[in-house]
Amino acid sequence: MANGKTDLLQGTLEMLILKTLTLEPMHGFGISGRIHQITRGVFQVRAGSLFPALQRLEQEGWILGEWGESENRRRAKYYRLTAAGRRKFTAERRKWQRASLAMARVLEAT
Amino acid sequence: MPLLARLSSTWHSLFRKQQLDQKLDEELQSFLELLAESKIKSGMSPEQARRAALLELGGAEQVKEKVREARIGSVVDTCWQDIRYGVRQIRRNPGFTMVAVLCLGLGIGANTATFTYADALLFRLPNVKEPDRLVRIFAEWTNGLKYGPLSYPDYVDLRDKNDVFTGVIGDAIQPFHMGLGDRNERIWGALVSGNYFSELGVQATLGRTFLPEEDRTPGTHPVAVISYGLWQRRFGADTGVVLKSVMLNGRRFDIIGVAPRGFYGTQTGLGMEIWVPMMMQEMSLGGARLKSRGDNFIPDIIARLKPGVTIAQARASVKTLMANLAKEYAGTNEGKSAELYPESRAGLHPMVREGATGFVGLVFVVVGFILLMACANIAGLLLARAAARRKEIAVRVALGACRVRLIRQLLAESTLLALLAGSFGLLLSMWLTDLLGNLRAPTELPLRLDLSLNTPVLAFALIASLGTGLLFGLAPALATTRPDVFPDLKESLSMGRGKGSRLRKCLVVGQVALSLMLLIGAGMTIRSLENARKVDPGFNPDNLLVASVDLELQNYDEAAGRQFQRSLRERVGSLPGVMSVGMAHAIPLGLVTWQVGVLPEGYEAPKGTSNPSIDCNLVDHGYFEAMGIPILNGRAFLETDNANTAPVVVVNERFALRFWPGQNPIGKRVRTQGREYQVIGVVKTGKYSSLGEAPKPYFYFALGQNYRGTTVLHVRTAGDPRMLLESVRREVRALDASLPVTDLMTMDAALGYALAPARLGAGVVASFAFLALLLASVGLYGVIAYGVSQSVREIGIRIALGGRPADVLKLIVRQGMVLTAIGFGIGIPAAMALTRLMSGLLYGVSPMDPFAYVGAAAILGLSAFLAAFLPAWRATKVQPLVALRDI
């Protein structure tokens, strides 16, 4: 995550994953690629961070992993958001918006 | 749903680990393939793409380890792993385990034993209802005297005129003569106020406790409550005891109840066996102390605060009350006030408490230091062993173990070790407190401490063990897993030149010095005990029997007492096998010593000093003959030296030499105790306070001219004095059926008690010496073993280049011996200083006793040699090739 790229804030990765999964169920590689793509390469998620995070989210019951087949017929584990995960994400998003608004105000203030 | 999901994933991660791991493997595999595929798409060759993907993944094992850690229950799981690993390590190194458990166990044991005493003496509250609402009231005078007793009338006023206490208890401990069946004995009990048991909330196990009316009028209610222990011991736990009676100080008392088990009265550290109402005070001390405000005889006043009243409010109230009394009874109460202390700070009398706290603190410093030493040495051993394990650790780091995890694992091992040591220490502490508890302390007081194993003691041992485990485990764990450990190791090619090793060498030198000092000290005390048996006490202790009777406590007046003493002397003197009989106030080298100021004729005390204080005794006309003390000049006392004749004394040779050198002491006059005495005889100088003392002046009053009710009968026998023990007891019984004979024993046994403090001292010094020896050996071994492990490569090179193993051995052993020699260099002068300090306690041993010095040096030298030789010998077994490849 170093090398000129921005480090993820604690807990941010989990929110990014939840966000990614609101669109459609995805496998691990897909999630990492999507985050890379959306943030235009600012955030690069390594396997060493991704998989423990997936593990945590699954344990909390916010996502559910199921084995399926990928676009080019490979077996992969697809994660989808559960109802609890969706609620969690909504709540988190609200919190983030409030926080970033406040941060922005502070930084813009002269 | 989340709860269910959580439960199921916990279940899975704990019990379906393999399955989970397999799934994870598959997932990572698929991730890799997808990653590689995307790289191929962007134009890499399949070969390149796989390499790049692997690189980007950053080590499959590391990722897996991280995921495992993120799992619920991973803590339980990895802890369990760590413990299993620790157990394996401990079982694989039985020698190391034994040494560590022994060293640490001794340290933890000593600390736990000390804590057991501290807890029993200083921390524990009495076994009564709501002890935290109890306060103690002590007299205090304006001249600065504190913690004193109050008089009975003061107590009554405090009890009846306050509005802050629910009740106020008075308690005065004292010995009682208990006459019961055919065995009389002297026991300790207390005179207590009628509300004693009810206010403390202590209920009788059997029968009842005192009624209020039993403590209202002097001398009218001879009733007693006995302790559970006395009930078991003397009444065979007979439930009919409540109808029985017992003779106390020659008077009959009805037993009304048995106190509950575990109740020993309200004196921390003392155990009472009987309680009688305060109003029976007259029979016990023969005076009307209940009426006089000037006679401050109630040492313990305990009050229970009313609900909602604070100690500060109560204090103010008590001070006002005492101020009023001081005005009203200026003659006796002027300057007298009172102070309140919470029970937790005064259950042990505050003055004793101060001393005890200081002493316990000092002991804690010593045993804490020992434990720290043990920790340092075991840490050294662990470090030496960890160095040998660095290959294993390197492999594990390479396989993806993170540092925290490794440290945790190493700590788990040291904690297990510490817990083993703690269990051993706990056993040791129990044995030690048992041993110390069985010693007869040099006091007449009924010492009783509850030293049984309880929760605080167990908690202390546990915390001490865990703390030690962390202490000796952390440093080696950090050092071993330090990321730069490998370059560091490569650089240190020479024997133990690491950063910390100088400190550790200093520590070892200090330990060697300390243990040499203590070994020499132990040798001295052992020699001195041997010599003590040969010291001439100035009388003949063989075939001599002593027996004490206390007629004062039994309420005899002087006339009755003299009659009793005369009859006893005659009856025992006519027993078959008795050669002669004498009486004295105290036995030499016993607990009772008595000093008076004297002014011998013609002697002038140097200016600014008071009259010399000289030890003395009170003896009768048969004493010198019975004791076998030779009369050197003049005569012994005669039966005719009585109240009607001129006062006389007998002095010892040293007395005559000091005050009348070169003159005939017979006929000289001595002023003392307000009278003038004439010297009629001179006896040989003996030992009076301790066997090690220098000859000192001593003199004797005639018992016939100065009555004492507490006397010791000395009986010289023809044969074994033990044959006459029962006969003497029988003769006393024949004269007074309820009078106990105390301290009935042979003079040999009595002298054994005189030597007990010296024996205890020798035991303590010897144990500390053993501990120090063990610690020093382990420390030395650790340092040498560490050095060897650090220079396996150097040793390998030496051997590969043709160095003989014997040379390597010599090289390493020499290092150990150099450290030992430095320790000797410090230890010998230190020992000289110590033994000079001890010389007052030593009987006929020179502070330079060669036996002690050579013996100690030999023992320590041999241990040190072994400690250095073992790792050295192991080093020579190193295969050069293995050694060279190893790093």
Image: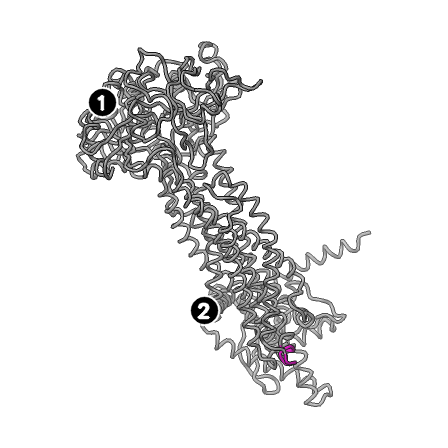
Q: Which residue is mark 2?
A: B91
Residue beneath the point at 22% across and 22% down: B251
Q: Position of residue B817 (x, y in %)?
A: 59, 62
Residue type, mark 1 in image = Arg
Query: Bounds of the magenta span?
Result: B796-802
How packed mark 2 is, by other alpha carbons closer than 10 Å (few <14, some 14-19, many 20 or more), is few
Q: Chain of mark 1?
A: B
Quadrant in the picture for residue B725: top left
Instruction: Please state which of residues B597 and B176 is positioned toward the viewer in this rendering.
Output: B597
Which is in the foreground here, disc 2 or disc 1? 1
Quadrant in the picture for residue B183: top left
Q: Position of residue B738 (x, y in %)?
A: 21, 27
Instruction: Please state which of residues A60 and B353 is positioned toward the viewer in this rendering.
Output: B353
Q: Which mark is residue B251?
A: 1
Residue type, mark 2 in image = Arg
Instruction: Please state which of residues B805 and B426 is positioned toward the viewer in this rendering.
Output: B805
Q: Position of residue B153 (x, y in %)?
A: 38, 16
Q: Please determine whether, in this image, residue B216 is positioned above or below residue B873.
A: above
Q: Which mark is residue B692?
A: none
Q: Is there one chain holding both mark 2 and mark 1?
A: yes
- Residue B309 can be seen, yes or no: yes
Q: Position of residue B367 (x, y in %)?
A: 50, 48
Q: Secondary structure at mark 2?
A: helix
Quarter of the image with the N terminus of chain A is bottom right
